[in-house]
Amino acid sequence: MDTKNFLNEVCKEIKYQPARKPIAEELKMHIQDIKEDYVSSGMPEKEVEEKAVSQMGVAEEIGKKLNKIHRPKLDWQLLILVIILIGFGVVVSILKKSIMNYNYIGNIIVYMLIGIVLGICIYFFDYRKMRKYTNIIYLIATIIMFLPIIGLDALINGVKWVRIFGITFMPCTIAVPLYLIAFIGFIVDYKNDNIIKIQNEQFNISLNKDFIKILVLGIFSLILMLYIPSVANATILGCAYLVITTVKILQNKEHKIKKLIILYAPILTFAVIFVTTIIFTSPYRLNRIKASFFPETDPDGSGYVGMLQKEVLENAKLIGQADTRVISSDEYVISRESNYTFIYLLGKTGILFSGILVLTIILTSIKLILNAKHIKEKYGKFLIIGLSTLYIFQSIASVLMNINMGIATNINLPFVTYGGVYFIVNMINIAIIFSVYRRKNINLFENESILSKE
């Protein structure tokens, strides 16, 4: 068998077509190396090719082995965990059916179908193509954040939401993951040698243009979050930025400690100044934070909802509805506001059921962390780290706030809290993670023109 026929037989067994050509080229090079060894040993050239090909082995068996390696893979474990989380969300929706409007379940079904369809499409989408549109993604996020500022707004509980064509959503819901994806693109494309020098008679300063871009755009996105205002989303986004930057620094071989000090020193300094300012100039904010953990200190004010949560926790059963009017009646905020989903579920179904939810959240978080560890492609790795950080921080903040162990925030529980746009965004986020994982064992062979230059 000659080289051409051998490669054709191998490639027939490889189902993922983009992998066929580069695999054939690699095998061809290997055959060429063997041929050169035979030629140098004095073997006649007529026998060299057939001998080299036969040494490679059986083409069909080689193709089948390569096919197992170079094929897309679905993360079934993560998929099952996500389905379970969505199942909890369905349960919450059914429990709340009586207190919502008549088309509540219909809306849930519509948004769920939209989210699933978009998720499937993104799963098959080559996530690497997003990288060259990093600036556009950042611009879209910024435009969304400006929508309530230009008049497309609805003020709910003192927070500016966006209202378009009858659909109301918090701009941060969409903007946070978009800003995060854009930030990841900036970090991955960061170049140490992209230097600008400022010189005059008194000083000579060298600045990295990529660093300035990341710093300015990152801070600007956080300022917009605070303007909405949404301190919780700004905090989570800022922490996600910090995680991504830390991982980027740790990947570099030189001056890790120095760079980490440069990163964390000003952040910690600002945090100390911020907390001190709150203590001395805004005591009411300090009281609100204290009431989040100890609601009995202000039961009729900042601690009112916390007292409701405490009552549910004290009367919760292992299985079944808690013996308290806070749960049996639909008039309390816990039954109506989406950010109290976890305590509502605990009160309605019991400790065992809500405990299974917590376990699912923990297992999902662990699986996401492990996935990030196993991804070799740089952009995909950072996407999983960033989006996983977003999911983990939101879940932790939501659950802790619901059981009086965290600061009261307007953060919802991913996949469990109902919200049409929120559900769709979460489905898109997790679909991107699935898309990255799908290609984890595949050498990405498509045309390099779809990527930005390293």
Image (cartoon, rainbow, N blue to C red):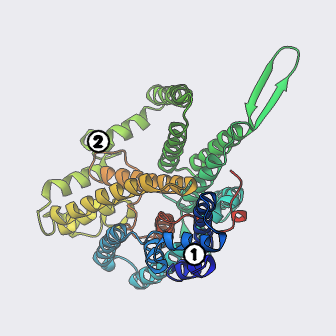
In the visual, does 382 lie left or right of 306?
Answer: right
Q: Is residue 215 visible?
A: yes
Tell which circle, 1 or 2, labels the residue nearer the N-terminal end.
1
Query: Judging from the image, what secondary structure is the residue with disc 2 in?
Result: helix
Q: Residue at x 47, y 32 (%)?
A: 282
Label 1, label 2: how far apart the Cα atoms are: 77 Å
Q: Residue at x 30, y 67 (%)?
A: 331
Q: Residue at x 25, y 66 (%)?
A: 345
Residue 451 point in image, percent of width and height? 68, 60
Identify residue for label 1. Answer: 50
Residue 311 point in image, percent of width and height? 19, 54
Considering depth in this image, is 72 or 413 the residue closer to the camera? 72
Q: Residue at x 76, y 27 (%)?
A: 206
Q: Residue furthest top?
A: 202
Identify residue for label 2. Answer: 293
Binning the other alpha carbons within 10 Å of mark 1 as few (below 14), some (14 to 19) or many (20 upward) gives: some
The tally of labels here is 2
Binning the other alpha carbons within 10 Å of mark 2 as few (below 14), some (14 to 19) or many (20 upward) gives: some
